[in-house]
Amino acid sequence: MNKPESISGGSSTKKSILHNGKTLMQNRADMYSTSKKTGHYDGLKELKLKKADPITFEKIFSKLRAGVVNARETAKKIAASPIVEQEGELCFTLYNTAGDCVCTSTGIIIHVGTMGMAIKYMIENNWEEDPTINPGDMFTNNDCQIGNVHPCDIATIVPIFHEGKLVAWVGGVTHVIDTGAVGPGSMSNGQVQRFGDGVQITCRKTGINDKPMRDWQHEVQRNVRTPKYWILDERTRIAGDHMIRDIVEEVIADVGVETFLQFTSEIIEDGRRGLVKRISDILIPGKYNTVAFVDVPYMHEDVHVPSPFAKVDTIMHAPCTITVKPEATWRLDFEGCSRWGWHTYNANPTAFTSGIWVMMTQTVVPTERINDGSLFASEFRLPKGTWTNPNDRRTAHADAWHFLVSSWSSLWRAVSRGYFSRGYLEEVNAGNSNPCNWMQGGGFNQEEEIHAVNSFETAACGTGACAMKDGLNHAAAIWNPEGDMGDCEIWELAEPLLYMGRAIKSNTGGYGKYRGGMGFETLRMVHNSADWCMFFMGNGYMNSDWGLHGGYPSATGYRFEAHNTGLHKRIAEGKSLPMGHDWNPDYPDYENHLEPGAIVKRDNQCITTEEIFENGDLYLNYLRGGPGFGDPLDRTIENIQKDLNDVVLLEEYAYKIYGAIFTKDDEGYYTVDADKTRARQTEMRKERLARAKPVKEWMKTERQNIIDKKASKQVQQMFASSFELSQPFLDKFRAFWELPSDWLVTEKELGVPAFGSKHAMDLSQMPDVKTVVLVEE
Amino acid sequence: MSTTYTKKQVADLIDGDLDWETVRRMLFMPKDQDRFAMYIDVLQDRAKWDDKIVMPLAPHLYIVEDKNGDIVNKCDCGYVFGPYTENWKLNAVIFVRDTDEKFNQVYPNLMAPNQEWQVYREYYCPECACQHDVEAPTPWYPVIHDFEPDIKTFYGWLGLKLPKKLAA
């Protein structure tokens, strides 16, 4: 029934491809206006199918849900790219005719929204008329201007027809290893605009008659560094899409097309009601105020960018007020965010809101029933011009995650306050780690092919502490709930980088009554490569994941790289080698195992651009830990002792943080003396009071610092950027610090370039383009 | 349908001593709607003062109804941080980590923030020195009022009796 059969014509007067006789555009407009008017998706005040025949309703859901999960698991097994095969960086989602998600697989479920937005874009821009939508078609999208997170997430979207009428859409997405950006690797930096951010495809028809077009394949494979993976990843997506299409055909054969169509609306209203129920079941109404930051240190000499106006240190600022309303819906308002910038960390509203759902499915709505219904029970406000919603079509997005994961950590903390107050301690999570470093690079690999790498060891960072247990060590990443660091042996096949060590990273989880999960570190030696470059990507001067209720933030990142190491000589001579732990970076040891003349970089500059790495050079990939929960002085003696014996806590910090007094026997086993430790903790409490001052007294000093404009340029630039975009944020700032009504700091007075602050051109100003907006701006 | 738990199980959860199988059930099953009442019950039994707990805010911090019927933020030790509608942090004491030396007491320097970008602000109780919260913002950032609960609506959701001054 989905055999290719041309639907007549390309004119606007052609026969409708929908059962209801409407155009796709009219169909969507009607659905949305009814939803808005009634407060129920598609006006469904009553779920007739679910009420009349709940067994059939659940059977349809189970079959479709199992179908999308099965498609993902099968596609994952046949994928070539280790990012897909090892880490599961793929996702399949079924949409109704309006492009709203019906159900989704496991995996990188942020794409529930991104692929849905691509479908909506095709609907609103009349793809129905040109290039036409027919059975057997395939559309490819990775355009960040219409919702994609970053260019490396490539979506293949297939319309599903039944007897010549469109009944659904299916989308499959994979994270490809390279998109031909200026910097190699899927989340590179160096480029500062869209023009250089990798190939971007805008909902292009790339297949007909169930086959990818030859001209498309010839063109695209030469635009990326890794054509083999590109082509095989596309086949992975097509295979999954077609498996799901088969399932839809089976369901329709079983229940009839009218029941199926009814289901694809009712399930979304069911999802909307599900979120409302869950909010009322687990949260507390009121306001949750939170904020997040992360560093963009571009002034450093190891950051090479093509444009002088990008050479500026900035800070991402993401304040948020979550309002849980009496009717158990919620509003997330990001008033006060900083401006988008000349780097690759910009987001867009769909990436931002869809990503929040990735997070929420791990906390507020941990159910397989997640679909676009949740969006209809939520309000998002993302002010135009901020990094969450750029007002300019030049923005780059390759590593949007640098900002996204940082901003979401604060949301996790916020909802956890509600869980804690309500007594659901098992749900509390102090936050997510900032899942980085992203170890990337490219050149000629060990097979003498042009290659690019992006290590997804980041998929297994430390998780935040709970209110009744520690966070998990090297376990997960917020963007993909299926945490997996991958196998060393597979990474060594995929990358010309030998493992010199892989170990849990001590002291990376934030301390607390319950500590954050530890990250880990891998030391890699470049081997059998040619013309090889690498770079670092992560947080270094700041951390984005605070602790909760007295717990500490997790550790920040740092970089270690070494060149001219002489390691090949040392290996030949049987000398000691740098391996395993970089225990305490303040007392470095790797350097003791390098030849004289080695050049070492050891600092907090965790964002760099391409640097030449010769064979034998070293790169430390340090994956971050999660934040802590509760006052560290409440940690049990047993847990402190366990941390010491598990080698996740340096002796020095067992004493400094927990006041632990301990002994170590000949076999290296630690015993913490409870009485002496409690006595030391009593002293520590006195020391706290001795060094602290009343908040209102401290505020006078800090206020004077503000009046005197005493702060680093990057801090002042962050505030200046937010002030310019948000009068409410400026008003609140002035009111809190009791500043004169004319007090202000501007980018102009700081002398930093602010290209894009005055002149911007949005996608909506392009000819023949109709943008789709789903948030308040 | 939701599972219910005993007061002992809720107490064990608070203490971090609940067996993992029960914790897993708590995570997987629909939420038990009597949890809040049971949670308050356990905490009230443990409180060193007679004020009625209205809502816990943190492990050692509560919104309570005092003997005058006022709704205030109160520490385990008895210190009162002011009316519940105000940010309790403004009545705490603070220590700001804004130098390498101060950061090095928490992390090796390369694993701690740079004070030109970020500081730690530790909020302690002025009486018992409990570390109720740690903020990690940029310098200049206003003190964050983390949570402003709508107690009236919440108690309505659960069908609980409101403190007199909130019911008025």
Image (tube, coloured by chain):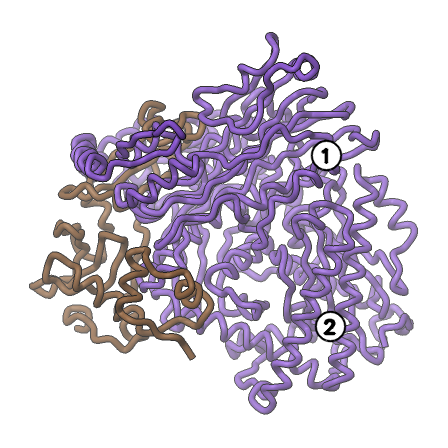
- Near mark 2 (Cα within 10 A), the count class, few <14, some 14-19 or many ≥20, is many
Give SS at disc 1: loop
Q: Output the chain of dot 2.
A: A
Q: CA distance from mark 1 to mark 2?
A: 40 Å
Percent from the top left, x then y, of residue A726?
44, 46
Residue A294 vertical position relative to residue A526 in the rendered view, above or below: below
Residue assigned mark 1: A495
Q: Quadrant of residue A617?
A: top right
Q: Is residue A87 above or below residue A675?
A: below
The purple-coloured chain is labelled A
Left or right, B160 with reference to A302? left
- Chain B color in figure: brown
Secondary structure type for disc 2: strand
- Identify the residue at image location x=31%, y=35%: A671
Instruction: Identify the residue shown where x is 75% and y is 75%.
Output: A248
| Amino acid at circle 1 | Glu
To which quarter of the image does residue A47 belong? bottom right
Chain of the residue displaying label 1: A
Q: Alpha-carbon neighbours of circle 1 within 10 Å: few (<14), some, or many (≥20)? A: many
Q: Which residue is situated farthest in the front direction here?
A: A666
Q: Position of residue A118 (x, y in %)?
A: 70, 59
Residue furthest toward the left? B68
Residue at point 32%, 23% (across, down): B101
Which numbered tag is attached to residue A465? Answer: none
Query: Label 2 amino acid?
Result: Ala
Residue at the top extreme? Answer: A596
Residue A168, which numbered label?
Answer: 2
